[in-house]
Image (cartoon, rainbow, N blue to C red):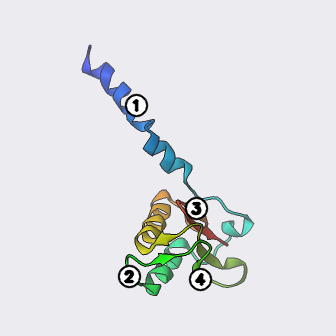
Amino acid sequence: MKLSAVLPLTFALFAASPSAAYDTATRNCWGGGNCQLGGCQLKTLEIEVYKKGGNIFSKQKAGTQLACCGRGKKRLCAYTDRVMTTVEINGSLGALRERGCRRCGHYDGLTIKA
């Protein structure tokens, strides 16, 4: 069998792996109408969360408001949906930013909403 025929199949199988499907299913940039407005951006909110600092092993309870930025309809806040460590929170914020989310989103237990 030619290598040119095997490579596309290999890439297709890799792309359909469970970890890739899980990552896509748990990460999105959804949000209501206020998410489409200008105002505080994810990068600014990420800085506010970092400012809170804390031990990398410290845990936040589910439903914890981590930080907010902006005012009124342009306000943006980060919340935990489950118990999360500082490392997990920072990783989720980075994943949303890398995905292209600018205001709202959800990733693996972290929700950003306006």
Task: Please give left or right for residue 72 compared with residue 106 in the image.
Answer: right
Q: Are marks 2 and 1 in contact (CB under 8 Å)?
A: no
Instruction: Return the x and y of residue 27 as percentages of the image width and height.
Output: 54, 55
Question: On the image, numbered disc 4 is attached to which residue?
Answer: 69
> Mark 4 against mark 3, which lies toward the viewer?
3
Label drawn at residue 55: 2
| Callout 2 amino acid | Asn
Q: From mark 4 to mark 3, how far is it between C-alphas?
A: 17 Å
Quarter of the image for residue 56 reads bottom left
> Mark 2 against mark 3, which lies toward the viewer?
2
Q: From mark 3 to mark 1, how far is it between C-alphas?
A: 26 Å
Question: On the image, numbered disc 3 is attached to which residue?
Answer: 106
| Callout 3 amino acid | His
| Callout 1 amino acid | Leu
The number of numbered badges drawn on the structure is: 4
SS of the residue at dot 1? helix
